[in-house]
Structure formats: structure tokens, C-alpha cells
Amino acid sequence: MKKAKSILAFGLLVVLLNSCVFSLFPIYTEDTLVYIPELIGRWDREGHEEYIEFINFPGDGESPDLTKAKNYHVVIMEGSERQDFVGHIAEIGKDFFLDLYPNDRDSYPSEDYYLKNLYSNMLPVHTFIKLKYANDQLELTAFDLEKLNKLFESNLIRLRHENVDGTILITAQPKEIQKFIDRYSDDESVFEDTEIYKRAS
């Protein structure tokens, strides 16, 4: 029964996030983690009913030492659909990448919200997105799943992974993933179109 629930959850996640690449392990290591305080706040996607919000994780009754925490509570809203993540930013080569991991049910504003978004909590995997920011503009660029699939199938990418119904699940360790990201971070052909967000006024 537990296995069936996991398969169902994975299937739902694949349908809803079919352009994402997933990893069992994070892309960051302690030496690559960075904290960017300028990201805190809400960013609206141009021309869409969608936004992403970076929030400081609360401390235990006190203000956390953000330079040591180096993580965010990330809320993504698409219309009325809400997803909550723990976010970390890794500096790999000369680029920043946002690592997202489903947050626990306590991060949701109500039990109803949690149940509606159950798929994002049942599958404990990481996904990652290229991130650029300047002034009041945030750019997020995801890997192109179809193009990566072709590279994996042709053995042009030698990175431990599984292919689950066309969805890549990377099983390599963080350092290996970083080498892969660093190699392809400047190759525009393996990325989707960039999504532009503006800081909410």
C-alpha cells in the first residue's frame, strides 16, 4: 500500500511538473551554499497569475543567523495552487542554482491547502533551476527535459540516473551533479525558455 501511494504521488508530480529534472540528493554542498538576502520577498511572473516568494525561516523565538542558515522557505503560487519548498542556493562555477525540496505539512496555511497539494509532499526529491537576479528582476531557467533525455539515452551525459516514464531521476551524489551542472550551465540548448519575474511593489 505504501509503495502504491508513492507511485501514485510520483505519477501526479510528473504530470504537474513534467519539465523538471529530479534528484534524490541535493545539488549543493557546504562549500557551494550561498545566501542572497536580496531575494527575500515576492516576485511576480510577467503576464501570468503566478509568483514565487522567498521567506526567511523563523527562528525559535529569536532572529536566526541568516548567514549560517543559508536556506529559504519558498512558496510558489500558480493561480490558486500553492507549493511549499525548502530552498537552497548553490554557486556552481559562475552561476547560481536554486535547489527546491518539498516542505513539510506544517508550512501550509491550512490542512485543506496541504491536502490539495499532497503530491508535493509525498515525494522526497530535489529539483533545481538556474537563477539570475539583478535589481528588481529575477530570472529562472529550468533544464529542458526532452533534450536532456536524448543526451542521457545517447550516453553523452554520464551521470547516475533512472528514467521513470520519461522523467529523469538523478541518483548521483552532489559533487557529481555539480560537475554535470558546471559543464552544461552555459549550453542554452539544454535549457527551457527563461521565466522573468519582477519584484512585487
Image (tube, rainbow, N blue to C red):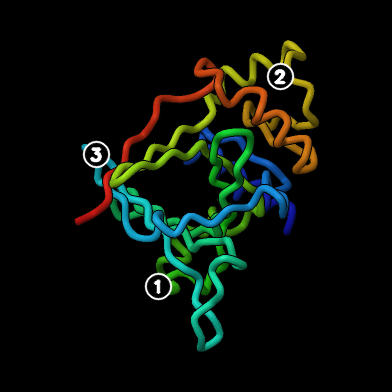
Specify whether 95 is left or right of 93.
Answer: left
Residue 200, by quadrant, is: bottom left
SS of the residue at dot 1?
loop
With respect to residue 155, does 33 lie above or below?
Answer: below
With respect to residue 7, does 106 lie above or below?
Answer: below
Amino acid at the residue labelled 1: Pro
SS of the residue at dot 3?
loop
C-alpha span from label 2 to label 3: 33 Å
Residue 127, by quadrant, is: top right
Q: Residue at x 36, y 34 (%)?
A: 195
Q: Residue at x 53, y 80 (%)?
A: 59
Of 95 and 44, which appears nearest the observer?
95
**Along the polypeptide, which appears first: circle 2 or circle 3?**
3
SS of the residue at dot 2?
helix
Q: Which residue is mark 2?
A: 152
Residue 142 drawn at (x, y percent): 49, 32
Can residue 82 be seen here? The reply is no
Q: Which residue is mark 3?
A: 46
Q: Are marks 2 and 3 in contact (CB under 8 Å)?
A: no
C-alpha span from label 2 to label 1: 40 Å
Of 125 and 31, which appears nearest the observer?
31
Q: Which residue is mark 1?
A: 109
Which mark is nearer the camera, 1 or 3? 3
Q: Are marks 1 and 3 in contact (CB under 8 Å)?
A: no
Query: Local crowd at mark 3 within 10 Å, few (<14), some, or many (≥20)?
Result: few
**Number of numbered discs:** 3
